[in-house]
Amino acid sequence: MNNSENTAVETKFKKPIIFVSILIPIVVAILFSVKLQDFGIKMEPLSFLPPIYAAINGITAILLVTAVIAIKNGNRKRHERLMTSAIACSVVFLIMYVAYHMSSDATKFGGEGWIRYVYFFLLITHIALSIIIIPLVLFTYVRALSQSFDRHKKLAKITFPLWLYVAVTGVIVYLMIAPYYVN
């Protein structure tokens, strides 16, 4: 692809990426407050999901690091497959996360003292960056698809550490709150 074709691909996806990047957090926030039981849907809480979606966050972190190693070693195809898998894991995580919260009451962190501040710092930064990372991942991915590799690499240098932070802190937040889940 030449530069104008690359730019055309990016331009084509710009509005949909912005739309999706705004829509996802809004829909998640709305669904987070919706309980299926409120609509007469009788079901047990999906309490088995948190360790699964925490593991998916861990897998995402491993995929991200492995993908960076692959591209540094010149293996573009492997990098592409790993990054696509990381995106897929993030989508699966999000579906499970929403499903859990639609079927279960929120779990309160029971830690006290300094650990409480650490937990809430990690949780707040995790949530904030999980919103910010959506358009970054999508724009980075589109730049790769459009073969704008210089621009892809430039944005990936921002996207990678933020996405890795979100994935790793997702696991840490789960491990910190896990003792307080009601079975």
Image (spheres, helix red, strand yellow):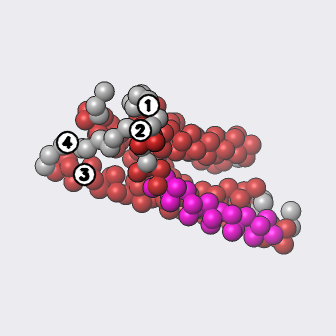
Q: Earlier in the sequence, mark 3 or mark 1?
A: 1
Q: Main secondary structure of the magenta part?
A: helix
Q: Residue 94: x percent and y percent? A: 52, 45
Q: Residue 101: x percent and y percent? A: 41, 42
Q: Which mark is residue 42?
A: 1
The residue labelled by disc 2 is 37
Q: Earlier in the sequence, mark 4 or mark 3?
A: 4
Compared to residue 158, the image places residue 84 above or below, namely above
Q: Residue 4: x percent and y percent? A: 84, 72
The residue labelled by disc 3 is 118
Mark 1–mark 2 distance (CA, rounded to whole Å): 6 Å
Tell me the quarter of the picture where residue 36 sits.
top left
The residue labelled by disc 4 is 110
Q: Residue 74: x percent and y percent? A: 70, 46
Question: Is mark 1 in CB contact (under 8 Å) with mark 2?
Answer: yes
Name the front one of labels 2 and 3. 2
Nearer to the camera, 101 or 6: 101
Name the front one of labels 4 and 2. 2
